[in-house]
DNA sequence: TCCCATCCTGACCGTATGGTCAAGATTAGA
DNA sequence: TCTAATCTTGACCATACGGTCAGGATGGGA
């Protein structure tokens, strides 16, 4: 017997629909930008009537805000790895791996984030000024400690962080360009590994990270 | 006597107006994205009536296309430096300087370019497939030659190029984030120099570029 | 001076978009 | 079973946008 489709409860319906809408919105905002995205297209991608979107998210802005906020959470989470690491080889190496993996699996999210920041962060500026500033200072302290302990060269931690962000996110944000330069085909598993290892090798050697062990 | 304002010739009028419009368009497209930009706003920034824009550029797309094309030209030009250099220290060092300078002076152009590529290059895909592919292969050959000559480590030239693009353009595309993390103030002259030298130092050391002389 | 080509622009148009609403369907729970 | 709360949706609205156009202004060349 092919699955007794028990009707969903109200709570389940809400959860499921919000998820479907947010996923569709992320995709559409990434592909068209905030201004180019239309509620109708998001609705089509989500497979729901447009009026239903407005039932769950009153305005286009409120929908966009939720998309960006959840992306920001992911963005920060990737760095837990950073703190527990004994030194830059492990910490920064793992951070690069984690961010490259995000670029690979959630390119749409990365693009929405890039777009938001490029347009002067109209909806998450307050987060940048509080959460991001704190987060950055924390990570800078870790790097500075590694420098003091002689585990890497005396690099300006700020610019190292920028380089890490730039390089890893580039593989998502400029994925189309990279694909075009790869004969129009997406990077294969091997090519992703090669990318990761190139990035890690250049940066870790570049900051004079002492090889562990 | 305060300047006899000779009336402009037709040719001058056209040149001047097209320049004013293209400048305004670049700014507005950078700030709002293609979809978010309006002809009215571009007209206001240019200080001309909207109908006048349509006299010089028949459609929004055609205006956008010209903006992107001229940015692409600049993008490519920055790499002449590359070819004549005797080795990676000079060539890549100078390339980083040049691209950082572009990021500093023409952040709007960089953002428009990033946005175009992020949205799968709807108007310049053909350029990517021809000009950019050729250009990239040329530069990869130069890097490979340096590797063969033992002037740097055997890095995958492709990923090195991506890192150069990513890192330098990041200072324009994510300039707002960088500014926010700099107490809300733009980078000073000294800070730009520090950024350039951090980037150069990490990358040149990271690829094992043999110091010249 | 006169005529033509180019330039300029306020007023206008059709359409697409974000958002609303009222009426119906479905579930919760008393 | 009956009522209230939640969910669903087609039809509708006001606005903003890209684009058009007719008619006037301005400069070029003979």
Image (tube, coloured by chain):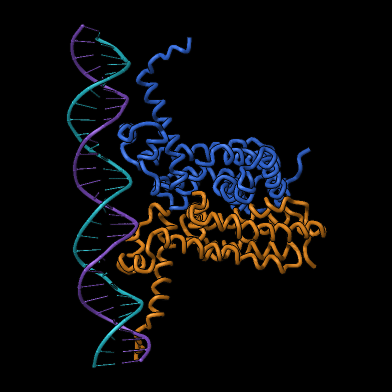
Chain colours: A blue, B orange, C cyan, D purple
- Up-down: is B5 above or below B133? below
Q: In terms of depth relative to the viewer, which is nearer, D9 or A122?
A: D9
Q: x%, y% of residue C17?
A: 33, 45
Q: x%, y% of residue A93?
A: 68, 41
Q: Is residue D17 left or right of residue B191?
A: left
Q: In terms of depth relative to the viewer, which is nearer, B51 or A81?
A: B51
Residue at 30% x, 66% y is B51
Q: x%, y% of residue A97?
A: 64, 39
Q: x%, y% of residue A87?
A: 69, 41
Q: Is residue A55 visible?
A: yes
Residue at 51% x, 52% y is B121
Q: Is residue B190 visible?
A: no
Q: Is residue B79 left or right of residue A127?
A: right
Q: Residue D5 sits in which quadrant?
A: top left
Which part of the image, by quadrant, shows the C terminus of chain A? top right
Q: In terms of depth relative to the viewer, which is nearer, B85 or B65?
A: B65
Residue at 46% x, 37% y is A70
């Amino acid at each position: 017997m092919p699955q007794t489709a028990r009707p969903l409860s109200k709570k389940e319906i809400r959860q499921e629909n919000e998820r479907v809408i947010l996923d569709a919105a992320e995709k559409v905002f990434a592909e068209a930008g905030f201004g180019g995205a239309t509620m109708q297209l998001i609705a089509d991608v989500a497979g729901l009537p447009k009026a239903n979107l407005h039932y769950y998210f009153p305005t286009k802005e409120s929908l966009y805000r939720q998309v960006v906020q959840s992306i920001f959470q992911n963005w920060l989470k990737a760095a837990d790895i950073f703190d527990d690491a004994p030194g830059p080889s492990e910490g920064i190496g793992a951070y690069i791996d984690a961010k490259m993996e995000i670029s690979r699996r959630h390119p749409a999210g990365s693009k929405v984030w890039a777009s938001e920041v490029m347009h002067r962060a109209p909806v998450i500026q307050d987060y940048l000024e509080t959460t991001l500033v704190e987060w950055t200072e924390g990570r800078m302290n870790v790097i500075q400690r590694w420098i003091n302990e002689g585990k890497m060269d005396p690099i300006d931690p700020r610019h190292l962080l920028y380089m890490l962000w730039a390089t890893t996110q580039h593989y998502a944000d400029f994925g189309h360009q990279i694909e075009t330069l790869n004969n129009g085909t997406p990077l294969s598993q091997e090519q992703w590994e090669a990318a990761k290892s190139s990035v890690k090798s250049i940066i870790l050697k570049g900051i004079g990270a002492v090889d562990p062990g």
